[in-house]
C-alpha cells in the first residue's frame, strides 16, 4: 500500500511584484511545483494521497489557486480513479472567524476527495482497509482535543495533522507512533522525520518572507510504503534560492564593497539570473550599504528575480549606554572650569528620587 | 511594564472588559474609529491608572515610571509619537530613547530648575539673534492662544461627553421601546392566531361542539359563544394593528435621536479639530520657549564674556542649566546616530531593499536612499515603512540598554504598508519578540490572515449588543493563532 504525502502547498502565494503574462511569478512557481508533484504522483501510482495543510496561502485564495488545485485533482481523478485524496487545512487557509467557511470545504464535493475543515474526524477509505484520522489546524488549538484511536478492524491506521510535534509538550492530542502505521504532519517547510513513521513532508516550494533560510532544503513530497514502513522523499525541482555566504569589507570603502559584491555574484554557478538571492554584508554600518547605490545594484536586481542585501553590523548591533548622570554633570562642570563642589547641594536636590508627586500621583 | 487589563466605558468602544496576555498579540478591530480609540487608550498606559480620556482604565503590571519625564519618554516609545512623521518623529524618538537611558534625569533636573527642556538645540549654536527675535515676535501670542484653545477643548470635551451620555440614554430608550413594541405585537399575533383557530374549530364543528373552556356541549349557547369569540378576536386584531404601526414607527430612529446623533458627530469633529489646533499651539509655545532660551543663551554668552571682563559671574543655576542642556543635547545626538543606523537596516529589510537605507541630512534629520540615489518624492508606502522602521529601531535600541520598555503598541502606519512589507514587519516583530514581554499590534486584520502562525494570540475586538439593555459591549474573542501541538508519545 503506497501513500503519497504532500504538505504546505501554499497555492496562491505571491511575492516580489514581478509578473509574467499578467500573473505573479511566484504564484506561478508555486502552481508549477504542485503540477510537477501531480505528474510525479501519476507515475508513482499511490493508493492514497494525503495533503496536510496550508493547501492555500491564505483563507481567501485567488482564483488562480483554485484553478490549480482543481486541475490537479481532476488529473488525479482521471489517471488514478481509485485513489482517494484526503486534505486538511492549516494555519494559512483557515479563516480567522470560526463561522467563516474554509475554502477546502468546496473541494470536499469532488469525487474521491475528503476534506476535514473544522473538527477532527476519522474516515475509512479503500473499503475500510485504511482508517485515516484527519486533524485540521483548529482541532489542535484548544480543548477539547480529539482523542485519536486506531481502529483494530482496519488493515492500516493513519493520522494526518497540521501541528507541531512535541515529545515533551502538555498540550494537544496524543499520538503514540507505535499504535499507528503512519503519522503525516504538516506545518514545517523542511522534510524531516520525528520518528520512523512520524514525518513532515515539508513544503513544495520555498515560500515566506525569508525563503533563503531554506536555500539548502530540498522541496518535494514523501512516498511511504505502509507494508515495509519505508518512506522516501521525492524532490521537485523549483526556482533556485541562493543564500550567499556573508561578505566582509572594510567600512568606508564603497569601491571595495562594489568589487566584492560583483565578485561574489559572478561566482554563483549558472549566474543569478531568475534566482532569489540573499546577500549579507558583515561588519558594516547600516549606512555603508549606500555604497552599493548605482548601476551595479540596479543591474543585479534586474537579473535576479529578487535580490535582498542586508547588513550585519561589526561586533553586533549598536547600542546606547546607560550612565550616571550626576557624575557626568560633575565631569562637565570640571571641564568647563567650574568647581563641581559649588553645586553639590544643588545637584543633590536636582537628582534626588523624590515621591510619586513627580508623576502626578498623591504621595 | 505591560498591559494586563482594560476595563471601563468608552463612548466609541462601549463597555470594555479585556484581559491582555503577554507575547506577540494581535488586536483586530475592523473599523478605523475603533482602532484609533484603542490606540489612544493604550497610549495613555505609562502615565496613569485612572480612567483617561476614553473612560477606560488600564491595569498594568511591572515597574512604574519614576518621574513624569521618564513616563513621557516611555509613552513616546511605547505607543509612538502622536501625529508626527518624518524628521519630527525621528527627533522625538531619539530624544525619548536618550531619555529612557538616563536623559529623563536631566529633564527632571531642568524641570526642577524651573527651566524646562526645549525640543531643539538650545545652546544657540548656529542661531541668528535677529532671526530668533523675529520668531519670538511672531509667536508672542502663542501662550494666550494656547490657554484659549485649552479652555475651548475642555468645554468641547465636556459637551461631547454630555451629548454622548444623552445619545446612549436616547438610544437605549428607543431600543427598549422597539423591543417592547415587538413583544406586544408578537403577543397579540399569537393571541389572534389562537382565537382564530378556536373560531374555526367551532364553526366547522357545529352546535354539538364542546365548549373550549368547560368542555360541555354548547347547544343553545353556541351562537353566543361564537359571537363573543369573534368580538374578542376583532378586538385583538385591532389592538395588534396598533402595535404593528407602533413597531413600524420605531423601525427608524426617532428624529430626536437622529438629532442627538448629529450633534454628537458634529461635536466630535469640532473636538478633534480643536485638539489639532491645540497641538499646533503647543508646538508654537514650545518653539517660542526654545527661541527665548536660545536667544537668552546667546545673549548670556555674549554677556558672559563681557561680564567676565567686568569680573561678574553667571549664577550657579545658569551654569547648571547650560551644562544640563549641553549634556541633554549630546545624549540626544548620540541617540540620533544609533537610531539612524538601526532604522537604516530595518527600512532596508522591511521594504525588501526598495529603500536601501537612511542617510543623515542636516536640513531634515534624514533622507531615504533608494537603489539609484536619494528618493526625492517618497511614496506613501515608503513613508509608512520608514515610520515603522524608526519606531521599531528606537524600541530595540533602548531595550538593548535598559529594562524598559518591556512592551510596545504598534498601530497606524502598519495599515498603510503594502502586503509584503506588512509580512516582513510581522517577521521582524517575531524576531524582536524575545526581548519584549508583550507586543500589541492593533490592526484591521489583513496581516493576521496572511501570517497567523506568527502570533501567540489573536483577539478580535467586536462591539456586541447586549440585547436587553441595548448597551454596547466590547468583547475580545480569541481567534486561531500560532501553531497547535500534537504530543508524540504514550
Image: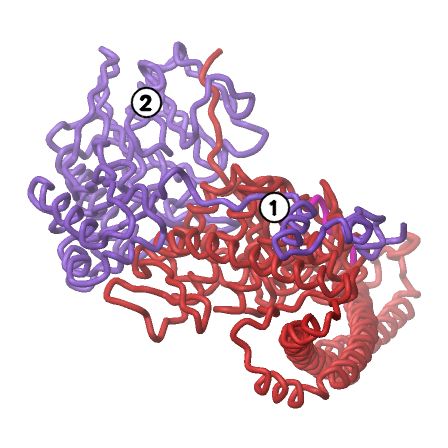
What is the magenta segment's predominant secondary structure? strand
Q: Decide: is B479 above or below A357.
A: above
Q: Position of residue B473 (x, y in %)?
A: 73, 57
Can residue A53 be seen from the camera position used here? yes
Few, some or many residues within 10 Å of mark 2 (<14, 14–19, 20+): many
Which quadrant, please, contains the N terminus of chain B?
A: top right
Residue situated in front as seen by the camera: A284 or B435: A284
Q: Decide: is A190 above or below B432.
A: above
Residue situated in front as seen by the camera: B16 or B45: B45
Residue A175 figure quarter? top left
Apparent side of residue A278 relative to residue B66 in the rendered image (left or right): left
Q: Position of residue B73 (x, y in %)?
A: 65, 56
Q: Residue at x 54, y 39 (%)?
A: B435
Badge 1 element: strand
Task: Give the letter of the purple chain.
Answer: A
Q: Which mark is residue A199?
A: 2
Residue situated in front as seen by the camera: B215 or B115: B115
Amino acid at each position: 500500500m503506497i501513500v503519497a504525502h504532500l504538505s504546505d502547498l501554499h497555492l496562491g502565494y505571491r511575492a516580489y511584484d514581478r509578473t509574467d503574462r499578467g500573473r505573479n511569478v511566484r504564484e506561478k512557481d508555486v502552481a508549477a511545483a504542485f503540477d510537477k508533484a501531480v505528474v510525479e504522483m501519476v507515475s508513482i501510482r499511490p493508493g492514497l494521497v494525503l495533503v496536510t495543510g496550508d493547501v492555500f496561502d491564505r483563507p481567501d485564495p485567488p482564483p488562480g489557486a483554485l484553478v490549480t488545485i482543481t486541475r490537479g485533482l481532476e488529473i488525479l481523478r482521471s489517471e488514478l480513479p481509485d485513489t482517494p485524496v484526503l486534505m486538511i487545512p492549516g494555519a494559512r487557509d483557515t479563516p480567522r472567524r470560526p463561522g467563516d467557511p474554509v475554502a477546502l470545504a468546496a473541494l470536499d464535493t469532488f469525487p474521491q476527495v475528503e476534506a476535514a475543515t473544522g473538527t477532527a474526524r476519522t474516515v475509512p477509505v479503500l473499503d475500510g482497509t485504511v482508517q485515516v484520522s484527519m486533524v485540521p489546524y483548529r482541532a489542535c488549538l484548544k480543548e477539547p482535543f480529539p482523542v485519536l484511536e486506531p481502529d483494530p478492524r482496519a488493515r492500516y491506521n493513519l493520522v494526518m495533522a497540521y501541528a507541531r510535534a512535541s515529545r515533551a509538550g502538555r498540550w494537544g492530542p496524543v499520538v503514540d507512533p507505535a499504535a499507528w502505521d503512519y503519522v503525516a504532519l504538516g506545518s514545517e517547510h523542511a522534510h524531516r522525520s520525528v520518528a520512523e513513521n512520524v514525518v513532515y513532508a515539508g513544503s513544495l516550494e520555498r515560500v515566506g518572507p525569508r525563503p533563503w533560510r531554506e536555500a539548502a532544503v530540498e522541496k518535494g513530497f514523501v512516498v511511504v510504503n505502509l507494508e515495509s514502513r519505508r518512506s522516501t522523499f521525492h524532490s521537485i525541482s523549483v526556482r533556485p534560492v541562493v543564500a550567499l555566504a556573508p561578505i566582509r569589507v572594510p567600512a568606508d570603502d564603497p569601491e571595495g564593497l562594489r568589487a566584492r559584491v560583483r565578485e561574489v555574484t559572478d561566482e554563483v554557478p549558472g549566474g543569478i539570473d531568475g534566482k532569489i538571492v540573499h546577500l549579507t554584508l558583515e561588519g558594516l554600518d547600516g549606512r555603508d550599504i549606500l555604497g552599493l547605490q548605482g548601476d551595479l545594484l540596479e543591474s543585479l536586481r534586474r537579473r535576479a528575480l529578487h535580490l535582498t542585501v542586508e547588513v550585519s553590523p561589526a561586533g553586533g548591533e549598536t547600542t546606547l549606554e546607560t550612565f550616571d548622570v550626576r557624575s557626568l554633570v560633575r565631569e562637565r562642570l570640571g571641564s568647563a572650569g567650574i568647581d563641581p563642589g559649588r553645586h553639590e547641594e544643588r545637584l543633590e536636590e536636582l537628582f534626588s528620587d523624590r515621591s510619586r508627586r513627580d508623576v502626578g500621583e498623591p504621595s | 511594564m505591560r498591559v494586563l487589563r482594560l476595563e471601563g466605558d468608552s463612548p466609541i468602544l462601549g463597555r470594555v472588559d479585556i484581559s491582555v496576555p503577554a507575547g506577540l498579540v494581535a488586536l483586530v478591530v475592523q473599523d478605523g474609529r475603533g482602532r484609533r480609540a484603542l490606540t489612544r487608550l493604550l497610549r495613555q498606559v505609562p502615565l496613569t491608572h485612572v480612567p483617561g480620556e476614553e473612560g477606560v482604565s488600564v491595569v498594568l503590571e511591572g515597574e512604574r515610571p519614576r518621574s513624569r519625564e521618564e513616563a513621557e519618554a516611555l509613552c513616546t516609545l511605547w505607543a509612538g509619537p502622536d501625529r508626527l512623521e518624518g524628521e519630527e518623529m525621528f527627533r522625538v524618538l531619539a530624544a525619548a530613547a536618550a531619555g529612557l537611558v538616563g536623559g529623563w534625569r536631566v529633564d527632571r533636573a531642568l524641570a526642577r530648575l524651573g527651566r524646562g527642556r526645549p525640543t531643539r538645540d538650545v545652546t544657540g549654536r548656529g542661531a541668528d539673534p535677529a532671526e530668533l527675535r523675529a520668531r519670538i515676535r511672531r509667536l508672542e501670542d502663542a501662550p494666550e492662544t494656547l490657554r484659549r484653545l485649552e479652555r475651548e477643548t475642555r468645554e468641547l470635551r465636556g459637551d461631547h461627553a454630555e451629548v454622548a451620555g444623552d445619545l446612549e440614554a436616547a438610544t437605549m430608550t428607543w431600543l427598549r421601546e422597539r423591543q417592547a413594541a415587538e413583544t406586544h405585537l408578537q403577543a397579540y399575533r399569537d393571541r389572534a392566531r389562537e382565537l382564530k383557530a378556536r373560531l374555526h374549530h367551532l364553526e366547522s364543528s357545529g352546535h354539538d361542539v364542546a365548549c373550549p373552556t368547560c368542555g360541555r356541549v354548547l347547544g343553545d349557547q353556541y351562537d353566543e359563544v361564537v359571537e363573543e369569540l369573534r368580538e374578542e378576536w376583532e378586538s385583538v386584531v385591532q389592538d395588534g394593528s396598533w402595535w404593528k404601526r407602533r413597531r413600524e414607527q420605531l423601525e427608524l430612529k426617532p428624529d430626536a435621536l437622529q438629532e442627538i446623533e448629529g450633534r454628537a458627530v458634529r461635536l466630535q469633529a469640532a473636538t478633534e479639530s480643536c485638539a489639532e489646533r491645540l497641538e499646533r499651539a503647543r508646538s508654537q509655545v514650545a518653539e517660542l520657549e526654545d527661541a527665548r532660551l536660545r536667544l537668552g543663551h546667546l545673549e548670556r554668552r555674549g554677556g558672559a564674556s563681557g561680564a567676565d571682563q567686568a569680573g561678574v559671574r553667571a549664577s550657579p543655576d545658569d551654569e547648571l542649566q547650560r551644562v544640563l542642556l549641553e549634556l541633554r543635547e549630546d545624549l540626544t545626538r548620540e541617540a540620533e546616530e544609533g537610531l539612524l543606523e538601526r532604522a537604516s537596516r530595518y527600512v532596508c529589510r522591511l521594504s525588501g531593499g526598495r529603500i536601501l537605507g537612511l542617510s543623515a541630512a542636516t536640513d531634515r534629520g534624514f533622507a531615504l536612499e533608494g537603489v539609484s540615489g536619494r528618493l526625492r518624492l517618497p511614496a506613501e508606502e515608503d513613508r509608512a515603512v520608514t515610520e515603522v522602521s524608526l519606531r521599531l529601531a528606537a524600541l530595540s535600541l533602548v531595550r538593548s540598554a535598559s529594562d524598559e520598555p518591556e512592551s510596545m503598541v504598534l498601530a497606524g502606519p502598519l495599515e498603510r504598508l503594502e502586503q509584503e512589507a506588512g509580512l516582513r514587519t510581522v517577521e521582524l516583530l517575531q524576531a524582536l519578540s524575545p526581548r519584549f514581554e508583550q507586543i500589541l499590534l492593533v490592526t484591521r486584520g489583513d496581516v493576521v490572515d496572511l501570517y497567523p502562525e506568527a502570533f501567540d494570540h489573536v483577539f478580535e475586538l467586536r462591539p456586541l449588543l447586549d440585547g436587553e439593555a441595548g448597551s454596547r459591549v466590547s468583547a475580545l474573542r480569541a481567534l486561531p493563532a500560532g501553531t497547535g501541538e500534537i504530543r508524540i508519545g504514550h
